Amino acid sequence: MFRITKITDYGFLLLVHMATQEEGRLHNAKDLSKSLNVPLPTVSKVLKILTQGAILKSHQGSKGGYSLARPANQISAAEVIEAIEGPLAITDCSSAEGCKRNCRVSHSWKKVNGSMVGVLRQLTLADMAAE
């Protein structure tokens, strides 16, 4: 079964929460942890990963925190998953590199993977926050 990891699930939880707040507002790990009931070390880890993936911006200083790097309607679910987990592929043979076996099923998996990635690229944080 294809599943995203718990870290990615927490990433979406944090990002959608941030997307529902006023644009440009800074969020710190401690407050996010408390508001969303997610352990602080996990929140800190996810924020760091999302910053490295250019989904979030980090603002230094005593009044610093994190903000979305772009408006929520410009951040896709695919970008979030790729920032945390890497390239989207449901099987090795459906990845960009493909697999070493050029078998009959690889074409079918690539079609399925392409459809799934297409849907995830169309789904934005703003869409998720609105639901």
Image (spheres, rainbow, N blue to C red):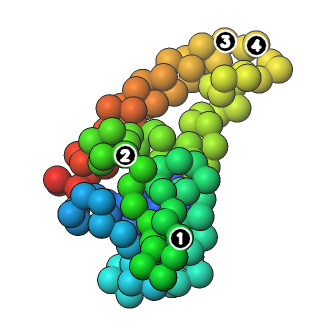
Name the image quarter holding the C terminus: bottom left
Q: Which mark is residue 104?
A: 3
58 and 16: which is toward the camera: 58
| Mark positioned earlier in the residue sequence (2 or 4) | 2
Of labels 1 and 2, earlier in sequence is 1
Residue pointed to by mark 1: 60
Is the residue under label 3 in contact with that under label 1 (CB below 8 Å)? no
Q: Amino acid at mark 1?
A: Gln
The residue where tag 4 is placed is: 102
Label 3 element class? helix
Depicted 7 relative to depicted 101: above or below:
below
Badge 2 amino acid: Arg
Between 5 and 59, the one lying in front of the other is 59
- Name which residue lies at 73% across and 14% down: 103
Residue at figure coordinates x 42%, y 79% from the top left? 63
- For the residue carrying disc 2, how many other residues have a C-alpha within 10 Å: few (<14), some (14-19), or many (20+)? some
- Per the image, label 2 sits on a secondary structure element best described as loop
Q: Position of residue 22 (x, y in %)?
A: 21, 63
Which one is closest to the eye, mark 4 or mark 1? 1
Query: Residue 14 occupies which quadrant of the picture?
Result: bottom left
Does residue 11 lie above or below 63 as drawn? above
Could you tell me if the residues under marks 4 and 3 are in contact, i.e. CB atoms within 8 Å? Answer: no
Mark 3 vs mark 2, CA separation in Å = 41 Å
Q: What distance separates the C-alpha of mark 2 from that of mark 4?
A: 40 Å
Q: Separation of disc 1 and disc 3 at Cα?
A: 52 Å
Residue type indicated by callout 3: Arg
Q: Position of residue 10 (x, y in %)?
A: 46, 66
Q: Quadrant of residue 46?
A: bottom right
